[in-house]
Amino acid sequence: MSRRIEIRNPEVELARFRARLAVAGGVVVTLFAVLLARFFYVQVVQHDYYHALAENNRISIVPVMPNRGLILDRNGVVLAHNYSAYTLEITPSKVADLEATIGGLTSVVEITAKDRKRFKRLMEESKSFESLPIRTRLSEEEVARFAANRYRFPGVEINARLFRQYPNGEHAAHSIGYIGRISDRDLEQIEARGDTANYRGTDHIGKFGLEESYEHELHGITGFDRVEVDSGGRAVRSLARQAPVSGNNLILALDLRLQEVAENVFGNYRGALVAIEPSTGGILALVSRPSFDPNLFVDGIDPQNWDALNNNPDKPLNNRALQGQYPPGSTFKPFMALAALELGKRSPSYTIADPGYFTLPGVSHRWRDWKAGGHGMVDLHKSIVISCDTYYYGLAQELGIDAIHDFVSQLGFGGKTGIDIKGEQPGVLPNQAWKLKRYKQKWFAGDTISVGIGQGYNLATPLQLAMGTGVIAASGAVYKPHLVRQVEDSRSKVLTPVATDPVRMLDFKRENVQRVKAAMVDVTRPGGTASKAGAGAQYVFGGKTGTAQVVAMKQGERYDEKRVAERHRDHALFIAFAPAEDPKIALGILVENGGHGGSTAAPIARKLLDFYLLGKLPESMQVGEEDGDAGD
Amino acid sequence: MATPAIKRIVTFLAGHIDSFLLTSLLVLLGVGLMTLYSAGEQNPARVTSQLANIGVAFAVMWVAANIPPHILKSFAVPAYIIGIVLLVAVDLFGEIVNGAQRWLDLGVTRIQPSELMKIAVPLMLAWYFDRYEATLRIKHFAIAAVMLLVPIGFIAKQPDLGTAILILASGFYVIFLAGLSWNILLALFAAGCASLPVLWSFMHDYQKRRILTLIDPTEDPLGAGYHTIQSTIAVGSGGVSGKGWLNGTQTHLDFLPERTTDFIFAVFSEEFGLVGNGLLLCLFLIVIGRGLVIAADAPSLFARLLAGSLALSFFTYAFVNMGMVSGILPVVGVPLPLISYGGTALVTLFLGFGILMSIRTNRKLVQT
């Protein structure tokens, strides 16, 4: 081989090129010959075998759907289960005249206009060879009537299908969620996960709440039947079968009874309540009001119901507990107080004389206390008990926004808590960097001052309030909030606990936490802002009231004359933990436009704690207890 | 009636059309439409919509045929650079469809830049070799390989293994035809075999499954094996003479997946049998052969390399698809050229045919 650069001869080059082209042509012919040989092998040598498969004994692989896992509360009460019901199903591709068939069926079983509409919609979104339900939940009598008339309806069958049901209706709907028919979007995600095979034959998927977030646990493994089918597509015999594996069961930390009480005592307010177990992070109850009935979604929600839910200005489908971001108001003060002690900015004995307002040197603006004229001499303890704003204006100013942010964010504010259902919002715990990024503005001293009393840029979800309260209650142990306590393997029945070790231990000084807790306890005693709610309690509990201003309508909200006044009212907040000496429960409560925390939110907490700690049902549930939740 | 005016119009319209190539393409398109009608459950709407695609494809072909090769050459670098930019854009902001990031949403329309690269890559490489024609050395082959592997990397990452392989092949053909030494080819082949295990470890699970499925399709009958089992049954049950047009039972009992697109060959094969398959292979060979003849007669190195690559790429598409449907190649999403339903692939193909025609009809102008 010569490596010298030579003057190339075009004739030689062309000849070389043509030689290469000839080689390529040879490869083409050879590979086509390989294909032809393959065709010959399959179509001539193996023809009989494949012919038999295709013609006489078409083999059909029929997927066998697994049972979806159950969702149970901590006491084993069923929150989501499956029941079997007869459905009347039509395979459109096997029916000559669909209209006539449906018309004929009407004389045998009742088919409403709604059923027809739903069937039409199913047809549009499915493949023609699928068997689609036209009527669900047939009675025994209807099944018998159809059986007698079956010969008249080729392509129509009765199948026993499993349906998802949520026996408790609206209770805990936001946590449990719901399932719905698999959409194109879901299909894309299933394919992206490489789960397509496992979803062959499955037509429902979790769409919301735990049903969505734990889809991979709940779904199970699809089995299959390899069956011979005759020329009409009817199964003749089963050749091989692999049984499906049921989905795993979810056992929640949630206590349904507590949940029901919480929803009951919440009344007709909009808002959210989160009850958390401080020693584990388990969610005991999670209320988001208003709620909805997840059963509506199982068969495919009809347009009227969907519009009613979707266009409702109260947004029942929003999970306010983890999506609603509200100013925490004065419930932020205990966290500020702890920061002051831990960071050494305040000693317990440090006292201010509160004139009823706070000023910054060189700034004419006065930050007012909620009480005109002020609270007189205020130390840390009193600042929590009577909720003194002036104390915290000065404290925030001295701590500085970055120190506040860095300390309080450890307790779960300003970022997602990592709860095990989707859709959580992070809230806002501002610092200088945040404002620069969000508003391209530098931080002003004045910004810090309102943050100190939980206003300004400060936003928290009710879940974060409960979590932060839980961290104080547990003296610094931070747990990830979780709804699911254990996953039960459907085959081995082995329970796998959700990790219950603390995510981190915040090294608070014992006496500092005790001081904050003691002040919170005095909030519920005479002289405190929640003294009415605390009156006569047979246990000691700590709390903090909050009242957050709703300054303006939120963006995108429509002006509605009747509602505007009500919607401008303050939000009422309350956080609590009980019993004070060994907290078993921590609460975060937000009542939209509820007025004052002490008068609206705190009594809700009291009733809930009475039930949780003493088993005392609220009065509203004692009447007609035998009737259960009828009409709820 | 042939007045001079009409004659002029005909000359203008047909002046750069290669009638031999056009005739073979028309026959193949006819076969395709027939099969599509059967595969689409005799729903004429599918055929009508494919006819519209063909219309667009012809327009593109006509335009390409009327662009002389030296102008075409000036498109090479911009087309390649735009293609790379679009691929980067897809990587950054692409829309995820079916788990793969292949599409770029321009608001008005969605484009798939990898489709553009099917033409842009051979165009670029042909331009490059043409430019350094007089001084070609190993260095140039190495640079060409890099120019080829950059877009391949992006496309394989999307992941779109099928298209990546097709484009890799199209670029390889240019490099091969430009005269890459046999020794290096052998070394590459050996290295390729040796790197298979490494490649394996980089593959997605579903890609691995497809290859394992090839060895035993019954291993995963609901998943990856489903396509192969059903399409092989369709092909095999077709026998020597097939079940006849519109009579494919596999097809019409809905066992066959994606039967108007990637698996349309199973429909054809079931209904027309070994005889039909043989004829179809011949038709494909005629088109490929014509392409190779055009390459052999082409006046410049650029035109030669481009034409050769386009003809051989067409072969690759056909081979990979038929191999996949008949169960000797893993399932990668590659349509059967000129037969499968779908507009984008068709337009790209006819852009290629238009270029071939331009090279054919312009050869004398330069040669003399």
Image (cartoon, coloured by chain):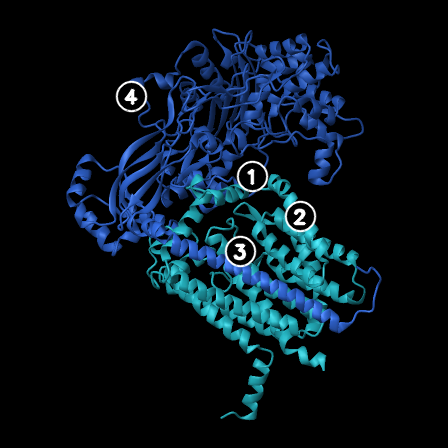
Name the chain under label 4: A
Kind of element beneath mark 3: helix
**Left/right of residue A580 with respect to residue A110 in the rendered view:** right
Residue B249: percent from left, percent from top: 33, 55
What color was chain B assigned in the picture? cyan
In three-dimensional space, the C-alpha distance between marks 3 and 2, rounded to whole angstroms, equals 22 Å
Mark 1, residue position: A553
Look at label 4 and name its amino acid: Asp
The answer to whether residue B3 is above or below residue A248 is below
**Left/right of residue A106 with respect to residue B188 in the rendered view:** left
Q: Earlier in the sequence, mark 1 or mark 4?
A: 1
Mark 2, residue position: B190
Look at label 2 and name its amino acid: Ala
In three-dimensional space, the C-alpha distance between marks 1 and 3, rounded to whole angstroms, equals 61 Å
Mark 4, residue position: A627
Name the chain under label 3: B
Look at label 1 and name its amino acid: Met
Q: Does the rendering let one see residue A238?
A: yes
